[in-house]
Image (cartoon, coloured by chain):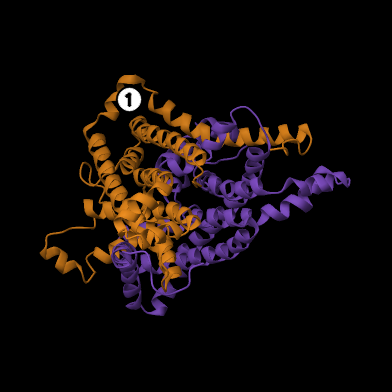
Amino acid sequence: MDNKNTGSKVTKWILVGISFLFVFVMLILPLVTVIMEALRKGWDTYIQAVTDEYTVKALLLTLEATAFAVIFNTIFGLFSAWTITKYRFRGKKILTALIDVPVTVSPIIAGLIFVLTFGRQSFLYPYLQELNINVVFAVPGIILATVFVTFPFISRELIPVLEAQGTDEEEASALMGAGGFKIFTKVTFPHIKWAFLYGIVLCVARAIGEFGAVSVLSGHLRGKTNTLPLHVEILFNEFQYVPAFAVSSILVMLAVAILIIRSIIEYIGKRNNEDVR
Amino acid sequence: MKKAGKRVIPAFGISMGVTLAMVSLIVIIPLASLVIFTSHMSFSEIWETITRERVLASFKVSFITAFIASLINMVMGIILAWVLVRYDFPLKRIIDGLIELPFAMPTAVAGIALTSLTSDKGLVGKFFANFGIKIAYTRIGITVALVFIGIPFVVRAVQPVLEKLDPSYEEASKVMGASGGKIFRSVILPEILPPAITGFGLAFGRCLGEYGSVVFIAGNKPFETEITPLIIMSELQEYDYSSATAIALVMLVTAFLILFIVNLIQARNTRILGR
């Protein structure tokens, strides 16, 4: 790049200074606060809070919901991105818009629509009762909410890459007699593997941290329908600040790990000339 | 481009089938149940709910705080994108990676961290208390939480446009004697304003619906620091689904409206960026 010298040196350092100050106050300080508050009463209290029975159960539920979200949205992401970019059909725009709905609605509204779908006043409710399935205030509701808020994350990463790649290679292989599955694994997938991984990382990040939608559908039952972020809320509202921050520190470490993995994937993806992001 | 007609690539049926089945389960059926539920309510009932004073006050709080936060993010986003694209300085990669933190950090964690930072006893709160400014449990606190949430949107919208901007225009205007400020205003700003507005719109939409980071710092006093998503939440906790749905409808319509405008601006952006 040969345009690095635009503007005077003074402007440069003022702008860099403003950026540093902003990033420090808004992003680094909150991160540091979590760790400092978590360790305020020493290592032993910290370990105790992190290994508390309810914390471990909440962590397991969070991981369970995240696993479901990743599996479901992987299948959906691959199928929907393939369908949208490799074929021509009517209503493609509507389909794309529908896929994006979950990221445009407030998480609280996401929770609300699932309460309306599966709650007591729904026409589905009697049938679900007969089958002995509880969705609202139960684990299935939490999983559904998590899947919903992360729904477009993988397909959104894949669609632009597949679109840029076109359909020529797939058409050629089809004319040579390859089946759909074979074309996908041999021809299409090598182009999208980094974008695909990138989508999974985004999906995991959001699934672990989801709060609003899960909060509506969880009954906040400790040890049963409590995810890690909800557990943080309960502890904080009970003025148990040190345990609340200790549990938060688990989430912060996961978040930082996700950021690092994200950067690595982006870097490798760019080197392989695949347009990630 | 391929002409419409017979599809050459096999497996259209199964991939379309799987896609539609999953979209129906996760998006269409829940949205339909919202529509069905709404259809049982009368217009006057909805109107009465959404014009309750406490609800109107929450719209105001949500709107003002989200707007100011997104405006701050638009200015800071342009500065950050500019600095990250045009300058070299130490720790640049780390700053670039940190921009994404609000997407990776759970909102509840951000919420309690910001609350403890900006309360009277917190590091930042103590500093501002000297000037008689309270942050946590006021609208300023809500705005701070929303600024945190919205940081990545404008930066990530402006960055690619700035990267593709042809420097020869700037050089030409420099040769012709334009000052740095003038070049920025008349050559660079027109190019990055549309993506900045797109980022603003996306951040604004996200901030209006934000719940997790705000509930802790807001204090949730009716008429003063109660945001709309929180009202929906409390209606749900009282099993008043009609009121919750009525208020949610207002938010949904607003969100879709913002998205529509953003898409219009984005269509323009794509033309500039090319393929």
Residue at mark 1: A46
> In the figure, B19 relative to A264: above or below?
below
Q: At x 24% / y 31%, what residue is drawn?
A: A52
Give the percent coordinates (x, y) of residue B211. Answer: 43, 51
Q: At x 50% / y 66%, what residue is drawn?
A: B254
Left/right placement of residue B236 relative to residue B114 reads: left
Q: Residues within 10 Å of mark 1 (few under 14, many from 20)?
A: many
Q: Mark 1 belongs to which amino acid?
A: Tyr
Give the percent coordinates (x, y) of residue B123. Answer: 53, 30
> Which chain appears orange?
A
Left/right placement of residue B157 relative to residue A57 reads: right
Q: Nearer the viewer, residue B275 or A52?
A: B275
Give the percent coordinates (x, y) of residue A186. Answer: 35, 50
**Chain B palette colour:** purple
The quadrant in which residue B32 appears is bottom left
> Which chain does tag 1 point to?
A
The quadrant in which residue A129 appears is bottom left
Please, which residue is most extreme toward the right here?
Answer: B177
Residue A261 visible in image: yes
Q: At x 26% / y 44%, what residue is drawn?
A: A226
Residue A148 visible in image: no
Q: At x 40% / y 45%, what residue is drawn?
A: A193
Q: How many marks?
A: 1
Q: Nearer the viewer, residue B260 or A120?
A: B260
